[in-house]
Amino acid sequence: MSVATETKVSLEGLNLTASRRAVLDIVKGAKKPMKAYDILSDLQQVIPHAKPPTVYRALDYLVTNHLLHRVNAQNAFVYCQHHEKCFHDHPERFNVIFTCITCGAITEQAHHVMSNVMAEMTKAMGFMSDSHILECTGVCKECS
């Protein structure tokens, strides 16, 4: 499944301003992770007066509400491929983002066994994770 896969997103109860909605649509439509300044460039096509703080505030809101993920390895953002499956309401759920170092393609996967192991490890350590996203870099099937 690619990042740009079409899914129906439940936006009920969210305060999606015009800039937040535009940023969400830009990242959702991207085939690869997007950096903030690339998002800004695309956003300025829709909202000409948009400035960096507009993008950063929108990204913060969208990440906090689990519509986007920040990919730390690339300092970029991707649309949450598992949003519709509602894993975010379960504090023990961990997702893995696989990033191809050759083409930059991103795939997000989740597995209950891996989630259980991670939840058990963090609980045993008394560790409060601020992210339930694990990143794995390598080479995808198409590039290998």
Image (cartoon, grey):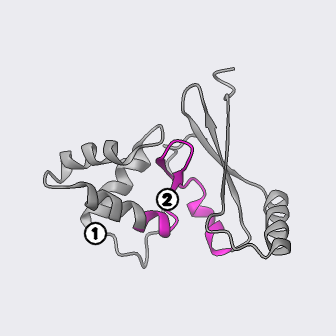
Residue sitting at x 25%, y 64%: 18
Residue sitting at x 64%, y 23%: 142
Q: Nearer the viewer, residue 91 or 21?
A: 91
Q: Residue furthest top?
A: 144
Q: Nearer the viewer, mark 1 or mark 2?
A: 1
Crowd around label 1: few <14 · some 14–19 · many ≥20 (10 Å): few
> Is residue 69 within the magenta segment?
yes
Q: Which residues are magenta?
A: 61-90
Residue sitting at x 39%, y 60%: 59
For the N terminus, which image quadrant?
top right
Q: Residue furthest left?
A: 49
Query: The disc labelled 2 sits on which kind of residue?
Result: Lys
The quarter of the displayed image where residue 138 is located: top right
Residue 144, compared with residue 13, is above or below; it is: above
Q: Which residue is mark 1?
A: 17
Q: Which residue is mark 2?
A: 8
Image coordinates for residue 65, horizontal then vertical, percent: 48, 70
Query: The disc labelled 1 sits on which kind of residue?
Result: Thr
> Is residue 89 within the magenta segment?
yes
Per the model, the C-alpha gap separating discs 1 and 2 is 19 Å
The quarter of the displayed image where residue 52 is located: bottom left
Helix, strand or loop at mark 1: loop
Mark 1 or 2, nearer chain start: 2
For the C terminus, which image quadrant?
top right
